[in-house]
Image: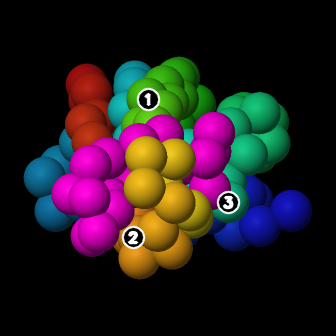
Amino acid sequence: MHELGVVFHIMDSLEKVAAENEVEGISKVILELGEVSTVIESYLQSCWKWAAKKRELFAEAELIVEMLPAVTYCEACEKTYPTVEHGKICPYCHSPDTWLMQGNEFNIKEIEVY
């Protein structure tokens, strides 16, 4: 379960930002999570709840995850399609000349502080 390491990385980064800006607490963290990012949201939420209890800055922090759909682009026919449903082969022209446009992200989008 690498989600715990991911949570620690997020919290470490936010603690630095909070210290630089004299933030007393974080009430909400919004993450963008790509559909094929290899991070499992339910595990991430569980790890967040556990870790937030251990760090004062996050004692009241809610984690909101916005899922970004995976979208693949086909160079042969120049169309996009849902990656999870169709994989690497284009459903329109059956070309393997495709690449992932979106869906692998893992970004801190927004934080709410007090």
Q: Position of residue 32 (x, y in %)?
A: 39, 41
Callout 1–callout 3 Cβ contact below 8 Å: no
Say what amino acid the circle numbered 3 marks: Thr
What residue is rendered at 69% in x and 68% in y?
A: 5
Say what amino acid the circle numbered 2 marks: Trp
Q: Where is residue 22 in the image (x, y as percent from the top left)?
A: 17, 49
Residue at the spot of label 2: 99
**Where 3 sits versus 47, above or below?**
below
Instruction: Quote the CA–CA distance across marks 2 and 1.
Output: 22 Å
Count of marks overlaid on the render: 3
What residue is rendered at 48% in x and 40% in y?
A: 82
The magenta-colored residue range is 70-87
What residue is rendered at 27% in x and 70% in y?
A: 75
Earlier residue among tags 1 and 3: 3
Instruction: Quote the CA–CA distance across marks 1 and 3.
Output: 15 Å
* Mark seen at residue 38: 3
Give the crowd class for mark 2: few <14, some 14-19, many >=20 residues within 10 Å. some
**Where 60 sits versus 73, above or below?**
above
Earlier residue among tags 3 and 2: 3
Magenta region includes residue 78: yes
Magenta region includes residue 82: yes
Residue at the spot of label 1: 66
* Nearest to the observer: residue 72 or residue 91: 91
Please name which of the two marks, 2 or 1, marks the residue nearer to the observer: 2
Can residue 110 be seen here? The reply is yes
Q: Is residue 87 left or right of residue 10?
A: right
Instruction: Quote the CA–CA distance across marks 3 and 2.
Output: 17 Å
* Nearest to the observer: residue 63 or residue 41: 41
Say what amino acid the circle numbered 1 marks: Glu
